[in-house]
Amino acid sequence: MAAYTVRIERWDSQDWRVQTPDTEIEDDERTSSEIAAEIALLETVADGHRWRVRVWRGTSTDTRPDAEEHIQRSP
């Protein structure tokens, strides 16, 4: 089992903006890709703008994320 950090961001015409505080998930058997995909499928904040879910293994977000899923739904 592993710990992960999840971040949800929205594109704001110039760059990505964090929309929710980073969330830590502890003792999860899923991979970072599985977590990102599941959150992207369940995410209800997408409103026609570009959104993404990023997942890091562990608690540090100083490196490139281990997984990333993009979300875009019609308003």
Image (cartoon, helix red, strand yellow):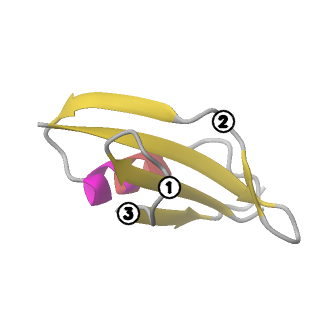
Residue on which disc 2 sits: 20
Residue 62 is marked as 1
Residue on which disc 3 sits: 67
Residue furthest to the bottom: 14
| Residue shown at the point (68%, 43%) measured from the top left | 45
Tell me where the magenta segment starts and ends, as one range.
32-36
Q: In the drawing, does residue 68 fall left or right of residue 32?
A: right
Task: Give the mark count.
Answer: 3
In front of the other: 48 or 12: 12
Queried whether the magenta region covers residue 33, the answer comes back as yes
| Residue shown at the point (48%, 50%) measured from the top left | 61
**x then y, percent, for residue 22:** 55, 36
**x then y, percent, for residue 44:** 61, 41
**On the image, which quarter does residue 65 sit in?**
bottom left
> Helix or strand or loop: what does disc 1 sit on?
loop
Q: In the drawing, does residue 37 fall left or right of residue 31?
A: right
Residues under labels 3 and 2: Cα distance?
17 Å
Disc 1 + disc 2, Cβ < 8 Å: no
- Quarter of the image with the N terminus in it: top left
In front of the other: 47 or 63: 63
**On the image, which quarter does residue 25 sit in?**
top left
Queried whether the magenta region covers residue 55, the answer comes back as no
Residues under labels 1 and 2: Cα distance?
17 Å
Q: In the drawing, does residue 9 fall left or right of residue 63?
A: right
Magenta: main secondary structure equals helix
